[in-house]
Image (tube, rainbow, N blue to C red):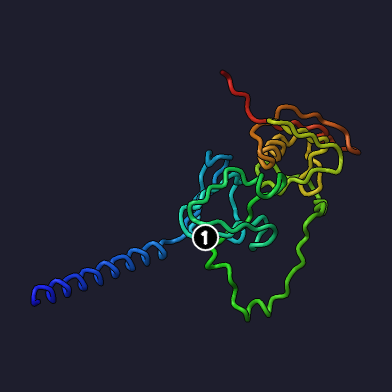
Amino acid sequence: MRCLKKCAWAFSVSAIAAIVSISQAGASESSEPPVLEMYEKVGMSGKKVTFSGAVADIDVRFPFHSASVVSGRWEICTRNDFRGACMDVDAGTEITSLKKEFGFFTRVRSLRPIEEAAAPAAMAAETPKTPEIVSRPRAAAQSAPVAGGAPAEPVASAEAVLRGHKAHFFKTPMFDGEPIEAADKSAARDFCREAGFEEVQFSEAVARGERQVIGDLLCAEPTRNP
């Protein structure tokens, strides 16, 4: 009888220790800091940028084309300040193509861990909501993009656009509603990269008033030699 009591007591202590150990392990996992990896190219390839907190205005030279959630839950949005089209993703999620999820002419411009997404009620009440513009064309800029500057979101004109498997033809490529200067090769490359392609395969200068702008632009993936 004494042995049974001692054995039962020992088993009880062991069980409690196991429960505490499991609880501590669970707390450790849940308290793991959020980490999100964003990649330059599809399929989690190319240059990688790692985020561990909220960024309301992403300042990265190249657009992101894929993502991997290392830990935590994240909100990924197509406009600054966590607006536009947003997606919630959990730990372990891999997005091989952000363009397929958000649309061809989109770019991830803000992101944050889910626990940081809820703003205080008082602040929300004080700040009037700005109506979201789902489709526009954007207002025309005063000048074309400066070579070497950060590219704006490309907006295709209403004229003909043709997309193939590994290339995309733009009859009138534009940045912020403004044609690309024919001499600005850097802006043409940025436009293609923003659209998800690596190279400018062909471009043609056309006259627009007294300016020479790019009238035809063919963006494509690089040719791989067998």
Give the image location of residue 15, x and y in percent. 24, 69
Point out the residue furthest to the top here: 226
Check disc 1: other Cα within 10 Å, few if <14, some if 14-19, many if 20+: some
Give the image location of residue 107, x and y in percent. 66, 49
Question: On the rendered structure, is 193 left or right of 142?
Answer: left
Q: Name the residue rendered at 77%, 49% in the picture.
A: 176
| Residue picked out by circle 1 | 73
Q: Closest to the observer: 30 or 225?
A: 30
Question: On the rendered structure, is 226 left or right of 8?
Answer: right
**186 versus 222 height, above or below:** below
The three-letter code of the residue at mark 1 reads: Arg
Q: Closest to the observer: 176 or 79?
A: 79
Numbered disc 1: secondary structure = loop
Question: On the rendered structure, is 173 left or right of 119?
Answer: right
Q: Quadrant of residue 223?
A: top right
Give the image location of residue 224, x and y in percent. 59, 23
**4 versus 39 height, above or below:** below
Q: Name the residue rendered at 17%, 75% in the picture.
A: 9
Q: Closest to the observer: 88 or 199?
A: 88
Q: Closest to the observer: 104 or 1?
A: 1
Give the image location of residue 57, x and y in percent. 62, 58
Q: How many marks?
A: 1
Point out the residue furthest to the front here: 1
**100 versus 30 height, above or below:** above
Q: Name the residue rendered at 63%, 52% in the picture.
A: 108
